[in-house]
Image: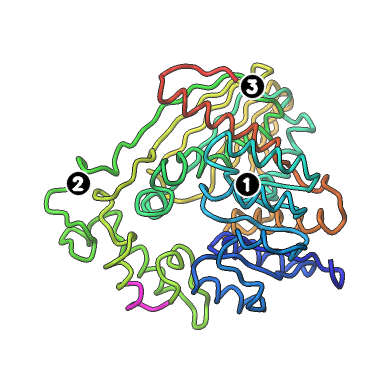
Amino acid sequence: MKEGLVELLVVGAGQRGAGYARHAVRTGRARVTAVAEPDPARRLAFAREFGIPAERALEDWARLREHDGRLADAAVVATQDTLHADPAVLLAGQGYHLLLEKPMAPTEPEARRIAEAVTRSGVMAAVCHVLRYTPYTSLLKELLDAGRIGRLVSIQHLEPVGWWHQAHSFVRGNWRSAASSSPMLLSKACHDIDWLMYLGGQPVRRVSSFGGLAHFRADQRPAGAADRCLDCSLEPECAYSAPRLYLGRLETLEPGERVPWPVSVVSAEADRAAVLDALRTGPYGRCVYACDNDVVDHQVVSMELADGATVSLTMTAFTPAEQRKTRLFGTHGYLDGDGARLRVVDFRTGEDTTIEVAADPSADHSDGDAALVEAFVSAVATGDAGLLRSDVATSLAGHRVVWAAERARHTGTVVTL
């Protein structure tokens, strides 16, 4: 660290990598000193934003092998899912502390390689399970640990992906294929599995799962639909219209405002002509019934914890894109939360209380991203790994539940871990 600031290398300067970098700088305790990003326009824009010199703006993370010393104290690895393992293993071996975007890796052998490299090198590492860090989670965990509902017996949890988010990320987008990315339960809901295990405080013993691709497939395509929204006579009435999603978001921008997600994924320019050109030629303008997607659009996972408590997770595309909803059933009480408020019912007194959570619901994961990055920067600055709410071993355990659920779904069995 120089001048008391934690120095960061960012590997993968896309939406998540850039977001974590901005949060780190906002803490006032970190600066970004290097980047590795293959896309030249994205690399240049990132380097300009953070004042990174040309010699530290690398087109390939593999070039880090050529450097004798580290370019920073810690690294953020935010490449695509299938490209996590190799840079994470290299950077851990070079002594970088790691903030690794979820999931760790698409397969268990790759994830184990990362965990082993971290253990071998002795660096601090955290996977970006940002839901652990929200004010809502902190309050919920405090109530559970204080015994407000007695012993936890069961949990019912809804992950409402959202109809347009499913179309953007998991039908047209980078996470549409299990082969090129990872199963949707891993890419989207490993957040939720990790969070539920955090609340339950127990390892998972048995798993079953059902689900599939119900709607976003060729046999659901309306008669007369074109391959692209811009050529389709049905587009004005289609729930999954790309022009409505992306151009509609442009209309809400203030002058000088940064291009917002998800438009920023489609075009780096907040310009109607640029977005239209991207929709005409790129993947985000395709008909949702004419894509090469294969990940599920709905899935149910049932889990039995080591102490006998049960957990039910429903992940579905067919909702508004809104906060997760969770009900927790205890021997002495009941909790019902939606990310912004918690209802607490005490069976012993009959008291029924609603608690509002002090958080910005419009922020990234309700302030979870900022809190995670602040905890990571503080941990690196002080050498105190206890400031992090999970480590790679914990994340690997959660990922193993996901892989077990996928085995259960494909085989129609109950999988014992």
**Residue 341: assigned label:** 1
**Position in image of residue 287 (x %, y %):** 25, 55
- Image x and y of residue 99, in percent: 68, 53
Task: Specify which label sits upstream in the sequence, 2 or 3.
Answer: 2
Judging by the rendered image, the residue that carries numbered circle 3 is 305
Q: Residues under labels 2 and 3: Cα distance?
A: 41 Å
Q: Is residue 271 magenta?
A: yes
Label 3 amino acid?
Leu
* Magenta-tinted stretch: 270-275
Mark 3 or mark 1, whichever is nearer to me: 3
Give me the C-alpha separation between circle 1 and circle 2. 39 Å
Left or right side of 13 for 219: left
Residue denoted by label 2: 221
Q: Main secondary structure of the magenta part?
A: helix
On the question of residue 363 being in view, the answer is no
- Residue 276's place in the image compared with 199, above or below, is below
Task: Report x, y in % for residue 254.
Answer: 49, 79
